[in-house]
Image (tube, helix red, strand yellow):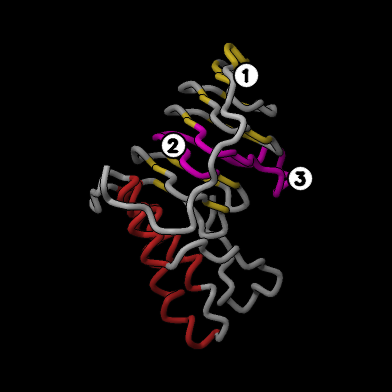
Amino acid sequence: MTLPLDPDSPTSDDISYPDPLPLKFWDMVREDWIAHGKDWTLPGFRAVFVHRLGVWRMQIKTRLLRLPFSLLYNALYRKVRNTYGIELPYTVKLGRQVVFEHQGDIVIHGHCEIGDGSIIRQGVTMGLRYLEHPYDVPKLGARVNVGAGAKLFGKIVIGDDVNIGANAVVLDDVPSGATVVGIPAKIVKIRECQKTQEPLSQEPVSEEG
């Protein structure tokens, strides 16, 4: 996947701005750091940090003031992509406390959505199924557990609390609470999800526990 069109380039008139971060930038970074075991050296944490930076800098509406942060973001994005093999454009709608557990061969299309508390492992690809539909890409609910090497293609919706087996190829919607495996992925188990899952607090998470 190529680097998403940057709003600070002269041909970016049609680019959409990402949603603002739900917390202050450093509160989001601290939350991600805790979710990644308080280890700032992990490639997954670094990839998420760069993503948060990319989203945050777009809140600076004056292009001239935003430019230094855009240059920094683009350099760090390429560093994470080329060094760790994690492509996570800032245009991805990334939830809170998302963990990239390992590095290598992770490609996330710039229009994908990943819900709160989800886990992404090495070798995961989330992208389009047909070239003529470049924006038909997966949307993950909350607490989705994506196994190593899994591929998710096309305009599909993955429900909350879904488990996707290693190397599964997911081409269809998956209901909440399901476990899917195989090529193409088939449902092998459905468990009842919590009916009223508490939303994440708007306050930063504590380091305790």
Give the labeled residue for mark 3: 132
Instruction: Residue at 46%, 22% (x, y): give it.
Output: 166
Q: Residue 51 location, x and y as percent?
A: 45, 59
Q: Secondary structure at mark 3?
A: loop
Q: Nearer the viewer, residue 159 or 122?
A: 159
Q: In the rendered view, would you say 30 is above or below 43?
A: below
| Residue 60 in picture, x, y percent from top left | 52, 80
Please report contact status of discs 1 and 2: CB closer than 8 Å, yes or no.
Answer: no
Q: Which residue is mark 1?
A: 184
Furthest-top residue in this view: 188
**What amino acid is found at the position of numbered circle 2 in the picture?**
Ile
Q: Is residue 166 magenta?
A: no
Instruction: Note whether residue 78 is visible.
Output: no
Q: CA distance from mark 1 to mark 2?
A: 21 Å
**First of labels 1, 2 by sequence position:** 2
- Mark 3: few, some, or many residues within 10 Å (few <14, many ≥20)? few
Q: Residues within 10 Å of mark 2 (few under 14, many from 20)?
A: many
Part of the protein shown in magenta: 115-144
Query: Residue 130 appears at what percent x and percent y?
Result: 71, 39
Residue at the image position 60 percent from the left and 64 percent from the top: 18
Q: Residue at x 54, y 46 (%)?
A: 199
N-terminal label among 1 and 3: 3
